[in-house]
């Protein structure tokens, strides 16, 4: 029992520190899983991109979108495709990550082959929950986004600008709230062997009262991700490989570290909240997968 003594509190620093310690124990395995998830996400993105390209002109004509918002909506759609691809690619491996992380916390060693074997049966449910989560987050983003554009251009300038600003704030805040609320769904699905909807409900209940801290954790890691992304883009475009295939793979490798951190966090958050909120002793978690 190495890390459970540190689970008596839930703070931004302690959770990030816990995730970092877990990564250090099996770095090649976690980085390898993240690379596989990135490759799968890329394949999914390539498959989804033509769908968005087909729907975009229809979407623009159906809602009579102003020309000024054309580029913004196009960029938003591409971003949404990317987020969905990452979510689906990662969800395939979340069960194995959850099992591996628990075993590292519990006894300091893990077989990744066993981790994948133990998680195989949960992959379809985790993917389904991920799809539901992605759809819900996309919905609470696009509704205020569209309302802001349509109403903002339909009324007078000052009021229209105010409506647009409020709608854009809602389009950022509401998806963020859902993401934080459901951030522990994959570990819950893996550990408690529940269905997709039940896993989301469990995550919602588990993260209650701690969502501000969880939000702070993900904001900090996303800032690190953006920094790594900027470095990867600058190096691949200007210094080393150029914009070709080698440049793309260089970017993927550079981004592996922050993406691995993002993949590890849900399981660490889940286990720490289980101990903190339910007052579980370390021994109570020893048979969590049995």
Image (tube, helix red, strand yellow):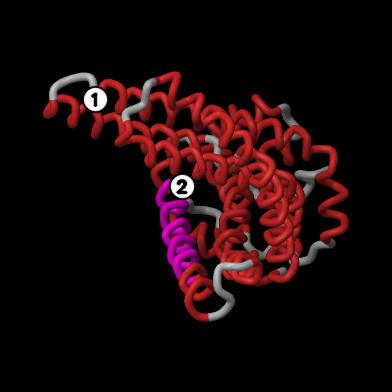
The answer to whether any part of residue 35 appears in the image is yes
The secondary element bearing badge 2 is classed as helix
- The residue that label 1 is drawn on is 153
**Magenta residue span:** 215-231
Q: Nearer the viewer, residue 191 or 36?
A: 36
Residue 277 appears left or right of 74:
right
Residue 204 location, x and y as percent? Answer: 53, 31
Residue 118 appears left or right of 229:
right
Q: Nearer the viewer, residue 73 or 254?
A: 73
Decide: few, some or many residues near mark 1? Use Cα within 10 Å; few <14, some 14-19, many ≥20: some
Question: In which quadrant will I find the C terminus?
Answer: top right
Q: Given this view, does label 2 or label 1 mark the residue nearer the observer?
A: 1
Above or below, 250 against 143 in this view is below
In the displayed orientation, state which residue is furthest to the bottom: 239
* Residue appearing at x 52%, y 53% in the figure: 8
Residue 170 appears left or right of 259:
left
Disc marking residue 251? none
- The residue that label 2 is drawn on is 214
Q: Is residue 100 magenta?
A: no
The answer to whether any part of residue 106 appears in the image is no
Q: Earlier in the sequence, mark 2 or mark 1?
A: 1
């Amino acid at each position: 029992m190495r890390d459970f003594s540190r689970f008596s509190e839930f703070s931004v620093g302690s959770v990030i520190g816990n995730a970092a310690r877990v990564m250090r124990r099996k770095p090649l395995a976690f980085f390898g899983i993240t690379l596989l998830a990135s490759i799968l996400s890329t394949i999914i993105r390539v498959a989804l991109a033509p769908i968005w390209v087909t729907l975009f002109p229809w979407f623009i004509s159906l809602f009579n979108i102003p020309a000024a918002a054309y580029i913004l909506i196009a960029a938003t759609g591409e971003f949404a495709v990317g987020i969905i691809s990452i979510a689906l690619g990662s969800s395939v491996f979340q069960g194995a990550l959850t099992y591996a992380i628990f075993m590292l916390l519990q006894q300091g060693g893990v077989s990744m082959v066993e981790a994948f074997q133990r998680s195989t049966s949960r992959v379809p449910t985790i993917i389904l929950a991920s799809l539901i989560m992605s759809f819900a987050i996309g919905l609470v983003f696009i509704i205020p986004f569209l309302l802001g554009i349509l109403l903002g251009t339909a009324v007078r300038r000052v009021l229209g600008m105010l409506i647009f600003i409020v709608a854009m704030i809602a389009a950022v805040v509401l998806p963020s709230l859902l993401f934080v609320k459901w951030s522990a769904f994959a570990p819950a699905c893996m550990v408690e062997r529940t269905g997709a909807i039940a896993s989301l409900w469990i995550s919602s209940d588990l993260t209650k009262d701690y969502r501000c801290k969880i939000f702070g954790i993900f904001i900090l890691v996303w800032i690190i991700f953006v920094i790594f992304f900027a470095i990867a883009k600058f190096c691949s475009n200007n210094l080393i490989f150029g914009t070709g295939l080698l440049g793309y793979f260089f970017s993927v490798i550079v981004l592996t570290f922050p993406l691995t951190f993002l993949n590890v966090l849900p399981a660490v958050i889940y286990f720490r909240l289980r101990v903190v909120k339910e007052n579980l002793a370390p021994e109570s978690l020893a048979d969590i997968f049995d």
